[in-house]
Image (cartoon, helix red, strand yellow):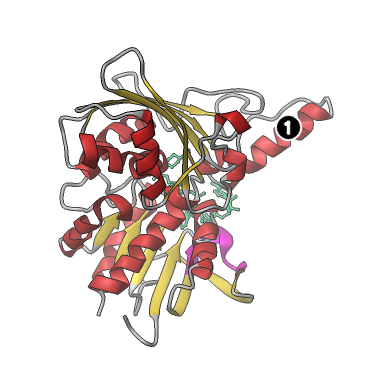
Amino acid sequence: MREEGYNVAIAGATGAVGGAMLDVLERRNFPLKSLRLLASSRSIGKTLKFKGEDIAVELLDENAFGGIDIALFSAGAQRSLDFAPAAAKAGAIVVDNSSAYRMDKEIPLVVPEVNSHAIADLKNHGIIANPNCSTIQMLVALKPILDKVGIKRIVVSTYQAVSGTGNPAIAELKAQVKAYAEGRPLAVEVYPHQIAFNCLPHIDSFLDNGYTKEEMKMVNETRKIFEDDTIGVTATTVRVPVIYGHSEAVNIETKAKITAAEVKELMVSAEGVELVDNPANNEYPQAIYCAGEFATKVGRIREDESIANGINMWIVSDNIMKGAALNAVQIAEVLIKDYIK
Ligand code: 25A
Ligand code: L14
């Protein structure tokens, strides 16, 4: 580790994820020498606060990365395709939150608690991909079970917060709730339908196979991160009127038998996981208590009585934190410990 700290840039600093990156860097006291905040021309003239100081937002372009050690990208897949290679060429290591590079065979896709070793492959292009939010929290919880008894198949249904779509979606949910309470008509702009008091089985765009892109990210990214193409994964991803925190009902078929009690024991010692499972006291993971938290919470652990080796569980995490900003900063922490001299 360098005494004087590291030069870090955030591309997409004004977004929902970028704002959380500032928060995580501050809360984890990341050793910074300098911090550069980048966004589109819409945000030029704005400042953002970091440790009580105002930092001006600068334009994201190919010349923005001189002297940067680590560039955290969260400005959408197109911006990553446009500018991440330039950042890497300028000598920065890129941690990319978008979907642009996740399934590229030469680019590591990393959840530090699960496959930190894959970071070594960053030497190919200087880019590391941060997985999809729904995938990250599921794998943090499933990894100890995978290691102990093996997993054959995963069936997951998600209940996803609007913050994943960014600040405009948060504003739209709040505005719809207010308009409803005041008896006014609801404006619908961000999603194809009203999201207040509704559930939309539609996240990201639809594909030819009838699934959404979000559903197929959960299938393909799980296989890549677990390094097992034989694992069966099927997903239904649903948008719900929640601001922060994705919830997931996860059913797994394991290779060998594991009891609910044994799974609970694994969750107690799992890195990044907190067991919240006391139904007698109405205690189970809930999105409203996950906002701003780093841990992935797991509860409602039961044996699936319809098959020999099955487990049901409920997994909740802040999609903007572990699902994006925290995971990216954790990768940066591994980089400064093991990879950047
Ligand atoms: O990979 P994908 O599928 O392409 O999607 C990734 C996107 O999903 C979000 C994240 O958006 C990311 O952009 N996301 C959520 N969870 C995620 C996760 N776990 C996740 N992504 C990965 N993993 P976001 O809203 O958090 O951030 C968007 C940022 O990108 C900046 N940006 C947009 N276009 C840009 C650009 N930066 C440089 N050049 C461009 N061309 C954006 O900054 C934001 O920081 P900004 O300056 O453009 O916008 C700040 C203000 O402008 C408003 N606004 C946004 N879009 C428009 C707009 N106003 C008018 N017209 C618009 N089209 C915003 O309200 C904001 O206040
Ligand atoms: O990281 O919730 O691939 O609308 C793209 C869709 C992030 C969440 C990604 C959403 C996602 C986003």
In the image, the segment drawn in magenta is 37-48
| Residue sitting at x 39%, y 43% | 267
Q: Which of the 4 image quarters holds residue 62?
A: bottom left
Q: Which percent across, then down, holds residue 311?
A: 35, 26
| Residue sitting at x 24%, y 71% | 338
Q: Which percent across, then down, holds residue 179?
A: 78, 31
- Quarter of the figure with the C terminus: bottom left
Q: Which percent across, then down, holds residue 251?
A: 36, 25
Look at the image and say whether residue 44 sits in the magenta stretch.
yes
Q: Is residue 320 visible?
A: yes
- In the foreground, 96 or 77: 96
Q: Is residue 83 visible?
A: no
Position of 238 relative to 298 (above/below): above
Drawn side of residue 77 relative to residue 287, left or right: left
| Residue sitting at x 16%, y 34% | 229
Three-letter amino acid code at the position of disc 1: Val
Quarter of the image where ligand 2 sits: top left
